[in-house]
Image (spheres, grey):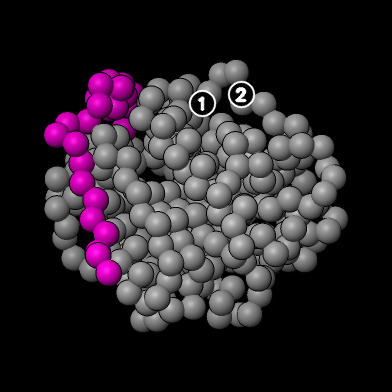
Amino acid sequence: MDEFDARATAEPDADTKALITELEARGCKELHQMSAEDVRGWFDAVIHDLALNPKPQVAATEDMMIPVSGTKIAIRLYRPEPKGAPLPALVFMHASGYVFGDLDTSDSFCRLLATGAHCMVIAVDYRRAPEYKFPGPIEDCYQAALWVAEHANEIGVDPARLAVGGESSGGTMATVVAQLAAERGKPSLCHQVLWYPGTGSLGPTASSQNYGEGYFLENSLQAWSVGHYLNDMAQVTDPRVQPLRYDDLSAMLPCYLMTAGFDPRRDDNAKYANRLQGAGVPVTFACAESTIHGFLFMLAGLASAREAAAESITYVKDMFAGP
């Protein structure tokens, strides 16, 4: 069986180069020197400017509160049609660096995904670091997926077609939720769908060395995020932080993983896909070769992001239509 590989184009596409210049002018290289609140404000403004406008239409959205860990968090349901026959569903975790982001971070993509794949998308507003540290956000996401499974009939979800997914740190949490579901015996999930997740690293890679500076996701920002998220840096080797460190991935769900050519995580994403495949897990691996990390919340600014989103949505539609 051939190993997965990922590569970049000779240089980023024109939209991506222009956006990198804009993000650097707005201060993305200095984010690691800012407070959590200031970084949240920075990302909220950028995401607002790069979201699709007007918003892609869905039949309905519904924000609701669900119980987790003795408190409540918000979820948002995106319906491609008025409530009727049960629909397949993807429980989605937004990008955050564990510190920023909310239900609006991936709103444009969730809307496109719900209508394009004709499924319900259920976005999770998990609690964030530094106020809520590891493994708290993971448990929020796990319990949200469990709640959806246990209340599937009430909200119009087909429990036999329930998947988890997410982008960036949300992708990390989605794949850990899949592992926890296997370890704990519930909920019953059918697939994991990941976009440029933090899989951890077992050593330097070409992409981490070539694209860790000057391509939006700075190495300094990654270190800042982990520093806010963990209680102690010794936790960095926990496989729930670096899924590449799981000893056994054989119980994992079938996986779709899309990375980006100019993402420092690209090569580690390929390693994770290869680890899954080597453990006997069905894997589809893709790479948006001409763009950067975070492209799903940059849809208004990047034609390549819109193309990658469409490719992913086709996969999810076919995934839910299959056996």
Residue 57 screen position, x and y as percent: 67, 26
Residue 66 screen position, x and y as percent: 76, 55
Dividing the picture into quarters, in which one does residue 141 lie?
A: bottom right
Residue 102 screen position, x and y as percent: 57, 41
Left or right, residue 119 beside residue 288:
right
Q: Secondary structure at mark 1?
A: loop
Residue 10 falls within the magenta-colored stretch: yes
Instruction: Compare residues 38 and 261 and report the one nearer the observer.
Output: 261
Up/down of 286 relative to 205, above or below: above
Q: Residue at x 77, y 46 (%)?
A: 64
Q: Residue at x 66, y 71 (%)?
A: 187
Q: Are marks 1 and 2 in contact (CB under 8 Å)?
A: yes
Read off the residue under disc 2. 55
Dividing the picture into quarters, in which one does residue 104 lie?
A: top right
Left or right, residue 259 beside residue 315:
left
Q: Residues within 10 Å of mark 2 (few under 14, many from 20)?
A: few
Circle 2: residue type: Lys
Instruction: Compare residues 48 and 58 and report the one nearer the observer.
Output: 58
Residue 197 can be seen in this image? no
Q: Residue at x 55, y 54 (%)?
A: 319
Q: Residue at x 61, y 23 (%)?
A: 55
Q: Residues within 10 Å of mark 1 (few under 14, many from 20)?
A: many
- Give the residues drawn in magenta, as a range: 1-28
Read off the residue under disc 1. 51
Up/down of 219 relative to 305, above or below: below
Q: Secondary structure at mark 2?
A: loop
Image quadrant holding the N terminus, namely bottom left
Residue 123 can be seen in this image? yes
Residue 264 falls within the magenta-colored stretch: no
- The label on residue 190 is none
Left or right, residue 314 beside residue 64:
left
